[in-house]
Image (tube, rainbow, N blue to C red):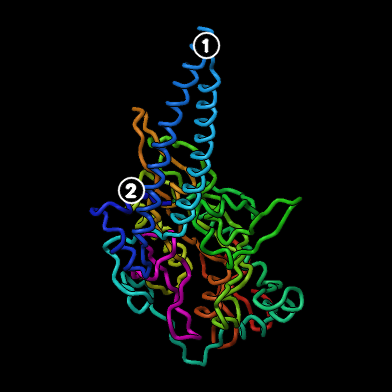
Amino acid sequence: MHDPRLLLDPDTDAAAKLRRRGYVLDTDRLGKLVSRRSEVIGEGDQARAESKKAAAEVQAAARRGEDVTGLREQARELKNRISELESEQRAVEAELNEFLLSIPNLPLDELPDGATEEFAEQVRTWGTPTEFDFEPLDHVDLGERAGILDLGRATKLSGPRFAVFRGAGARLERALAQFFLDVHTQEHGYTEFSVPSLVTRQTMTGTGQLPKFEEDLFRTAVADRELFLIPTAEVPLVNLHAGEILNLDELPLRYTAHTPCFRSEAGSYGRDTRGLIRQHEFSKVELVQLVDADSSRAALDEIVVHAETILRKLNLAYRVIKLPAGDIGFSAQITFDLEVWMPSQKTYREISSASDTGTFQTRRAGIRGKGKDGKRGAVAALNASGLPIGRTLVAILEQHQRADGSVAIPEALTPYTGFAVINKDGSVS
């Protein structure tokens, strides 16, 4: 959540920055709310001082044996006034907080202008998009022909946008998760966590999913408690330290977790409904870093490389793009997307987003920092997919398919799968 004083500071130029991402900041409303809050707080402080003085006068007059009826009435009126001002202060602060929670993060100046991916800046590419001397199949045809993917039975169980993996497909899915976690914990220094898939409204608010994206979330109730299914492990991993003061000298903290993720995909209206690209439930290995705010931009470059490492080890062609200001997520101040080559679509498709949220999420979650010298400092949060299991599986099937209908398993993954090839009939070798 933003500091309203910074939003109103002309030097911050917040309104202009937010316009770059398509958000119009109502500075007039914000200024009035901030002013009224200050006025109410000031009036309350004055009323409490007068009430304290009135109470002392009542006691002094009573000791002198004087009639204190009038003084007690004045003291009662002051207490009523204090109660009214406190009530108004709560109302103003609630309205101000609700307003602030709806304002997205400020994009960094280095982002290109624009609101769609066509305005993105390509940073680099790796690998050569696969060219076949046969007509390649998409992942659905490959998986269903081999019997390792069953979308029909998934629909029978849960409706559209769910998947069932079978045999070598299920084993490949499990192997990918283990491989991702091993690379990130053993090579990149992340600590692995197992976290809940159901979290509170406050937890969702801390990372910016609420109130903005409530329609995209699955909500349930457990023993009359409202809980939400997580859309990404970023939510619980960042909020592990909600309300805490972290030792700045012990940063960065690098966390990872493999979790199911749940998204309603409200508003997608038929986009990518075939196959595994856009599912209501999928699994993902997430990367989160908590760093000194002054180090966040450098940490973003690092976390991007960590996600790229997986794609390179799997020999999957991809590119890295810097998203334009109007296309970054609500909580992000800068985002790099990793896009993997999809032969069936003859284009690159997003497989990971890596974002620096600056202090946006940590302020919302109440995460602060303090050094050994006792000086307070700001903590920043970053996140990246490292990687989603389903989309990585799609890329492997499509990029590594062969003319005889089989799929070659990347060499780095074979110790985890126990096989090097998924044959056309679903058997392995």
According to the image, label 2 marks what residue? 5
Q: Quadrant of the C terminus?
A: bottom right
> Relative to 170, is 39 on the left or the right?
left
Left or right of residue 18, residue 199 in this image: right
Q: Position of residue 42 (x, y in %)?
A: 39, 36
Label 1 vs 2, first from the N-terminus? 2
Badge 1 amino acid: Glu
Residue for point 51% across, 67% down = 411
Q: For residue 66, which numbered disc appears in the image?
A: 1
Foreground pick, 220 / 73: 73
Comparing 401 with 277, the one in front is: 277
Q: Relative to 4, say whether 324 is above or below.
A: below
Q: Residue at x 69, y 79 (%)?
A: 151
Identify the magenta region: 324-352
Q: Crowding at label 2, few (<14), some or many (≥20) Cα neighbours within 10 Å?
A: few
Q: Nearer the viewer, residue 337 or 264?
A: 264
- The residue shown at (30%, 60%) is 108
Toward the viewer: 413 or 2? 2
Please tell me how crowded label 1 is: few (under 14), some (14-19), or many (20+) other residues with Cα within 10 Å.
Answer: few
Real-space Cα separation, disc 1 to disc 2, in angstroms: 50 Å
Residue 127 x/y as whole percent: 38, 74
Amino acid marked by disc 2: Arg
Q: Position of residue 90 (x, y in %)?
A: 51, 44
Tag 1 secondary structure: loop
The answer, for residue 184, to whether it is visible in the render is no
Is 77 magenta? The answer is no
Is residue 396 something that shows in the picture?
yes
- Residue 273 vs residue 36: left or right? right
